Amino acid sequence: MESTLCIIKPDAVKNGHVEDINKKIEESGIEIIKSKRLTLKKYIAEEFYAEHSERPFYPELVDFMTSGDCVIQILQGDDVVKRYRELMGATNPAEAVEGTLRQLFASSLGENAVHGSDSKQSAEREIAIMNNLF
Ligand code: CMP
């Protein structure tokens, strides 16, 4: 059984999409084993997105991710890293396939409703960062 990290981002929380997103996750056969609503501290968001620290959008990304409540979740299932990435859709909602979470609930590349680990290795790292917040 595999695990992955899911974040419902501040735009989706503010816009009231948490229940609809989690319904789609569960309908796809993925189990939500931990879930917590909280506002991320800046140092956690910085560590979490450290791989993007040299990118021009990094300060804006950290500001956005700490701007309001997120819902941090651990998902579990067979091949869940890949399956949840497929359910999320492309990073840019304008390119996301119909019916995916980002096509349904995101408004822009920066405010794209959800995050999901991009590999098993990232999932391990991201779960380790967030696990003590539950
Ligand atoms: P996420 O999957 O959480 O991983 C990194 C985030 O950076 C990404 O979603 C986007 O929301 C955000 N981001 C903002 N601008 C860009 C950009 N130009 N290219 C890629 N990601 C971006």
Image (cartoon, rainbow, N blue to C red):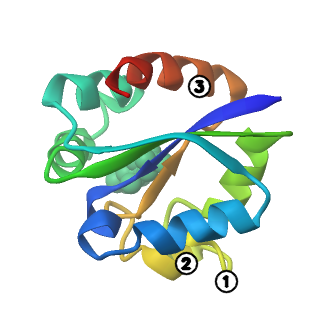
Percent coordinates x, y for residue 73 in the rendering? 49, 42
Whether the residue under disc 1 has CB within 8 Å of ligand 1 = no
How far is mark 1 from mark 3, CA to CA?
Answer: 26 Å
Percent coordinates x, y for residue 30 in the rendering? 73, 52
Residue at 16 percent of width and 31 percent of height = 41
The N terminus appears in which quarter of the rendering? Answer: top right
The C terminus appears in which quarter of the rendering? Answer: top left
Callout 3 amino acid: Ser
**Residue at the disc numbered 2:** 103
Callout 2 amino acid: Gln
**Residue at the disc numbered 1:** 98
Q: Earlier in the sequence, mark 1 or mark 3?
A: 1
Percent coordinates x, y for residue 21 in the rendering? 52, 68
Percent coordinates x, y for residue 26 in the rendering? 68, 61
Measured along the vertical axis of the image, is residue 50 above or below residue 9? Answer: above
Callout 1 amino acid: Glu
The secondary structure type at the circle numbered 1 is loop
Measured along the vertical axis of the image, is residue 129 above or below residue 92? Answer: above
Q: Earlier in the sequence, mark 1 or mark 2?
A: 1
CA neighbours of label 2 inside 10 A, class few (<14), some (14 to 19), many (20+): many
Residue at 60 percent of width and 19 percent of height = 124
Measured along the vertical axis of the image, is residue 62 above or below residue 11? Answer: above
Judged left or right of residue 60, residue 106 is right
Q: Residue 122's mark?
A: 3
Residue at 61 percent of width and 61 percent of height = 88
| Circle 1/circle 2 CB separation < 8 Å | yes
